[in-house]
Structures are given as C-alpha cells and as structure tokens.
Amino acid sequence: MIGNKIGKLGEDLAEKYLINKGFKVLYRNYWKPYGEIDIICEKAGKTHFVEVKSVSVSLNNVSHENIRPEDNVHEAKLRKLARVIQVYISAFHVKSWQFDVVIVYIDQVSKKAEVKVLENQILEARN
C-alpha cells in the first residue's frame, strides 16, 4: 500500500511540475485493457505520453542519484505503453508526439521532492 501512495503522490507531483512548465494535461491514468499511460499532456502542438516512476529516498543523501527507477520501464512495459500510445494516436489523430519518463524522488522526512524528466524515450513505438 505504501508503494501505491508513493506512486500516486509521484504522479500528482509530476502533473504539477508539467503544468508549471507550460504543459496542458489532457488525461491522467489513460487506461485500456492492455495498458495505461500515467499522464497525457500537450505543449506547443506536441502530445507527450508520460510514464511516471517514483521512489522514496533521502534527498540529503547524495547517493540517491544511483537509484534508477527508470530502469523499471522495461521491455514488457514498453510494449504495453506502445500499444496504448498507438491506439490513442489513432483515435485522436495525433500528428506530433513523444514519450517521456518523469522520475520523482520523494523525501518523506523533509517533505521535499526532486523531479527529473527523461525526454523522448522510445522511438520504436512510432513504427
């Protein structure tokens, strides 16, 4: 259950971060039976499909930089995401898009967070 709370908090923080960077959020948790996209947003005419990965760390400890939650976006996950992205692109006639991974490091003690964006992560889903 704690993982679900961290995940939800991470998605909330990622959404707030994206909005502050000028993105318009179109959907949260866009779900299809074969997968889900955490956030779908838009900026400058481009649709961004965002997978959020959150981890609880101590931000005072520099070693958190060695923690790589993005490694959990593995091949099986990418296949599911690619399928959902293709369906969305088709349904909404999306012309320009990219897939991003947002990493949220959450320090529950200090109640602070760091957000890192890895842009344009899967090009093979475009085929």
Image: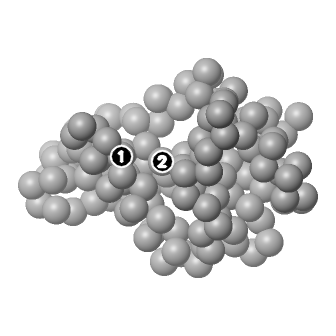
Please give the count of numbered marks on the rendered protein. Answer: 2
> Which type of secondary structure does the marked residue at label 2 adopt?
strand
Q: Label 2: how many residues lie within 10 Å, few (<14), some (14-19) or many (20+)? A: many
Task: Residue 51: tell me if it is visible.
Answer: yes
Residue closest to the eye, 48 or 39 = 39
Give, as a three-letter code, the residue at label 1: Gly
Residue closest to the eye, 34 or 64 = 34
Return the residue at label 1: 7
Q: Residue furthest top?
A: 76
Q: Looking at the rendered structure, which numbered label has been put on residue 32?
A: none
- Residue 51 image offset from top left, x and y in percent: 55, 46
Q: How is the image coloured?
A: one colour
Circle nearer the viewer, 1 or 2: 1
- Residue 52 image offset from top left, x and y in percent: 48, 48
Return the residue at label 2: 52
Mark 1 and mark 2: span between their CA atoms? 8 Å
Residue drawn at x 85%, y 53% is 91
Judge from the rendering whether residue 62 lies leftward or rightward of residue 85; answer left or right. Answer: left
Work out whether 18 lies above or below 86.
below
Task: Residue 100: tell me if it is visible.
Answer: no
- Residue 68 image offset from top left, x and y in percent: 39, 34
- Say if mark 1 contacts mark 2, CB within 8 Å: yes
